[in-house]
Amino acid sequence: MENNTEETKDGKKRMPLIPILAVLSVLALGFWFGLGQDTKTTSLANGEENHAEDDGHGHEAGDVQEKEGHKEGEDAHGEHGEEEGIKLSEAEMKEFGIKVVKADAGTLSRYADLPGEVRANGDRLAHIVPRVSGVVRKVFKGLGDRVKKGEVMAILDSRELSDSKAGFLAASERVGLAEVNFTREESLWKKKISSEQEYLEAKQVLAEAQIERRSAEQKLHALGFSNRYLKDLSRHPEESFTQYKIMAPFSGTVIEKHITRGEVLKDDTSAFVVADLSSVWVDLSVYQKDLAVISEGQSVVIKTMQGRIKTEGKISYLGPVVGEDTRTALARIVLENKDGQWRPGLFVNARVAVGKIESDLIVLKSAIQKINDEDILFVMAHDALQPKAVKRGRSDETHVEIIEGIYWGDTYVAEGAFTLRAQMGVGDLDDGHNH
């Protein structure tokens, strides 16, 4: 191997120049190449970071757009759902008591409205007046009390009654004595022992005694005492002779009381008024214009002025005379009143059907619901129940005419409309059915 070293003048060795330059060139090239790689790496890293930032911003915008689009889609679906209404299967409709029928033409009743008043049934009303005067000893019944037939309501002490009973007993005794004397005189006259004049006198005395007893007996009958009581009167204690019992003539209610313990009650004073309120009268005023269409036997719908109580009846009496002051005729209805809700004195309205009206489109009145001051009818459309605003026309007790909002043949909810109305503010009838 050739030695490329050179020797200097002072005898020292020196390295060749060319190899040194080659080594420096290689080092410089390596440094430049490494610097380029670092720069490229840094650029790539910065690019990825920028890309990550760009991607984050892009995804966020995309998410917002997607959410807004989804929300719009849901809103659109919600609006579409409202248009569709509430879809229910037959089983669900049966469960919630919903029945549908078709709107059709029909007949409405024409009415005459008459004012009236509830009164106690005059055939079941009693003013209880004592049949003798006396001092009130006891009072057992008060205003509003229920009484039964024959029940003692008050007791009087009456001297007049005592005299009547004593008179009857005395007359009975005289009859007994007269009968004995007549029997004896009759026997003696038949034996020719006494004269005929004595026999006739004995007969006359007996007849007079019997008349007196009969008179005293009738007087006590008039005071309410029975034959059985009079038969046993002689065995009653004397202190009971003055007692007069005021008794209820029939079962009913005390609606008036005019008696106080200790007062003197005369035989023309009404102590009690008792009424059997299980039936009452409703007296109606029939105007002259309605007389031609009102007759006995017609059906009438009666309700109180507030409309809380309602019932039906028939006209049992129509007066033949028009009142001079009111210029109205009397029509009377006898009402059953077992529960006592028809109180005498109540003012009522009575509606009498007097004719018919043909209509092109009617629905059941109970099917219409009032929602936000609108008359709403639930109508079946596209297999769903939809609320439809309608405009009413004429009506009667059960049906109403529809002049706007639905058409002939439309299917509507006839029963269960209130259930649908109650659920409109909270969604479907069942949370598990979100149609």
Image: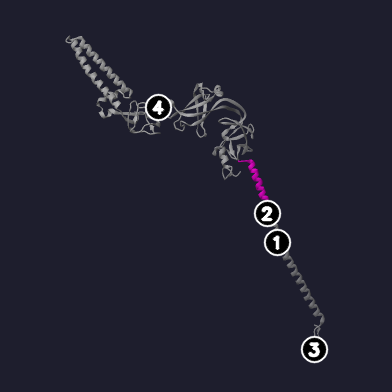
First of labels 1, 3 by sequence position? 3
Q: Position of residue 363 (x, y in %)?
A: 59, 32
First of labels 4, 2 by sequence position? 2
Single out the mark in the foreground, 4 or 2: 4
Single out the mark in the foreground, 3 or 4: 4
Tell me the CA gap for discs 3 and 4.
167 Å
Q: Position of residue 246 (x, y in %)?
A: 34, 29
Tell me the CA gap for discs 1 and 4.
104 Å
Q: Tell me where the magenta segment starts and ends, as one range.
A: 66-86
Task: Tell me whether the residue at label 4 lies in contact with that at label 2, contact meaning CB atoms closer than 8 angstroms.
Answer: no
- Label 3: which secondary element: loop
- In the figure, 240 relative to 98: above or below? above
Which secondary structure class fits the magenta region best? helix
Q: Which residue is mark 4?
A: 126
Q: Which residue is mark 3?
A: 12
First of labels 2, 3 by sequence position? 3
- Label 1: which secondary element: helix
Task: Tell me whether the residue at label 1 lies in contact with that at label 3, contact meaning CB atoms closer than 8 angstroms.
Answer: no
Name the quadrant of the N terminus. Answer: bottom right
Q: Please tell me in which quadrant of the rendered image residue 258 appears.
A: top left
From the viewer's side, name the closer residue of 208 and 276: 208
Q: Which residue is mark 2?
A: 64
Residue at the spot x=41%, y=27% of the render? 125
First of labels 1, 4 by sequence position? 1
Tell me the CA gap for discs 1 and 3.
66 Å
Q: Position of residue 339 (x, y in %)?
A: 44, 33
First of labels 3, 4 by sequence position? 3
Q: Please tell me in which quadrant of the rendered image residue 107 appears.
A: top right
Q: Which residue is mark 1?
A: 53
Q: Is residue 261 left or right of residue 409?
A: left
